[in-house]
Amino acid sequence: LNDLEAIVEQRSSAGAETSYTARLLEKGPLKCAEKFGEEAVELALATAAQEQGDVANEAADVLYHLMVVLRARSVGLDQVMEILNQRTAQSGLAEKAARNAPE
């Protein structure tokens, strides 16, 4: 994922006429989010159809578009990983209960 993040960063600097990544980012975060959502739905449908090859292809699309969405909102993968590290320091059920506990 770090390599993919670097590729998205590099391609975001290219011209929109030569880079799909730059073209997406030029259209703004909402378009990036729309594409991410489309790919996530396609992954869910492939998973439901139990098509292993399709699941792998759609998962690759989801990961790419996730990196684009993060770039569009200036969120680094390191930020996401830090949150995941905090969450995985305890069981998933305990972490979820802590997030939902009344203050």
Image (cartoon, rainbow, N blue to C red):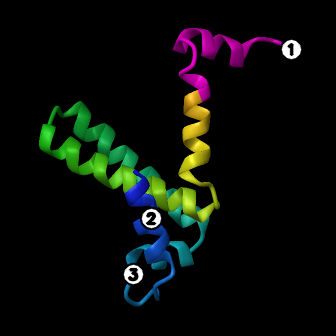
Residue at image location 59% in from the left, 54% down from the top: 76
Residue at image location 60% in from the left, 71% down from the top: 28
Q: Are marks 2 and 1 in contact (CB under 8 Å)?
A: no
Q: Nearer the viewer, mark 3 or mark 2?
A: 2
Quarter of the rendering occupied by the C terminus: top right
Find residue 4 and report its image quarter: bottom left
Q: Nearer the viewer, mark 2 or mark 1?
A: 2
Residue at image location 62% in from the left, 55% down from the top: 75
Q: Earlier in the sequence, mark 1 or mark 3?
A: 3
Question: Around disc 1, counting alpha carbons within 10 Å, would you say few (fewer than 14), some (14 to 19), or many (20 or more)?
Answer: few
Q: Is residue 72 above or below residue 45?
A: below
Could you say which is closer to the camera, residue 24 or residue 9? 9
Residue 5 marker: none
For label 2, the SS is helix
Marks 1 and 3, how far apart in space?
Answer: 47 Å
For label 3, the SS is loop
Which amino acid, mark 3? Ser
Which amino acid, mark 2? Ala
Q: Earlier in the sequence, mark 2 or mark 1?
A: 2
For label 1, the SS is loop
Bounds of the magenta segment: 86-103
Find residue 56 and report its image quarter: top left
Which amino acid, mark 1? Glu
Magenta-highlighted stretch: main secondary structure?
A: helix
Residue 103 marker: 1
Residue 6 marker: 2
Q: Is residue 95 above or below residue 48?
A: above
Residue at image location 47% in from the left, 78% down from the top: 22
**Residue denoted by label 3:** 19
